[in-house]
Amino acid sequence: KSVVSRGLLAGGMLTQEEIDKCREAFERFDKDGSGTIDAWELKETLKAMGQNPTDEEVFQMLSQVDDDGSGSIEFPEFLKVIEAQKEASAAQNDESDLIDAFVAMGGLTDKSGHVEAEKLRRTIKAFELTVDIDRLIEETDTDGSGEIDYDEFKGMFN
């Protein structure tokens, strides 16, 4: 394994299987065998991996990882792009799960509205979750309104 592979694996973002797939895709689109891919090749590689970045996103990705300013990226730089994409996707999924929970409890999809503290209390107890919900509500609902807005709701889970 290369130093890069070991480093990324230690970081836990990409699995060995993902790194192997990245290498396959990278080599398939490195048409001239130079060991680098340019912006166009990067876009085609990402499309082949199931993503659909805009030209602007591709150039932004390239500029973030093109450490040597060559206008193209080597495989270790390519792994950085994939890792950043994976992190962004995970963060987006976390946020959408939180919004889904907020809506299920009475909030709105645009993060407006609120959750009734009493409904939250009943739900936690109905599911027999081992959460000190009274303390959590007391800490979160600082104005004592009995209503928890999205930011307060989000704060409960961080």
Image (cartoon, rainbow, N blue to C red):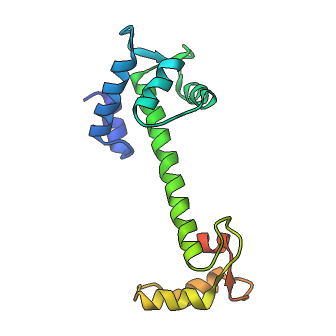
Q: Quadrant of residue 71?
A: top right
Instruction: Give 94 or 64, whichever is nearer the viewer.
Output: 94
Instruction: Give 97 or 4, whichever is nearer the viewer.
Output: 97
Which residue is drawn at the image coordinates 57% and 28% (left, top)? 58
Outermost residue toward the left in this view: 1
Residue 158 visible in rendering: no
Which residue is drawn at the image coordinates 45% and 44% (left, top)? 86
Q: For this view, does 65 lie left or right of residue 4?
A: right
Tell me where residue 75 appears, x and y as whole percent.
39, 23
Residue 66 visible in rendering: yes
Q: Quadrant of residue 109?
A: bottom right
Residue 69 higher or lower than 146, as above or below: above
Tell me where residue 122 appears, x and y as whole percent.
52, 92
Tell me where residue 140 appears, x and y as whole percent.
64, 80
Q: Quadrant of the N terminus?
A: top left
Q: Quadrant of the C terminus?
A: bottom right
Count of marks, rendered view? 0
Which residue is drawn at the image coordinates 63% and 82% (left, top)? 139
Tell me where residue 17 appears, x and y as whole percent.
27, 39
Instruction: Give 154 or 50, whichever is nearer the viewer.
Output: 50
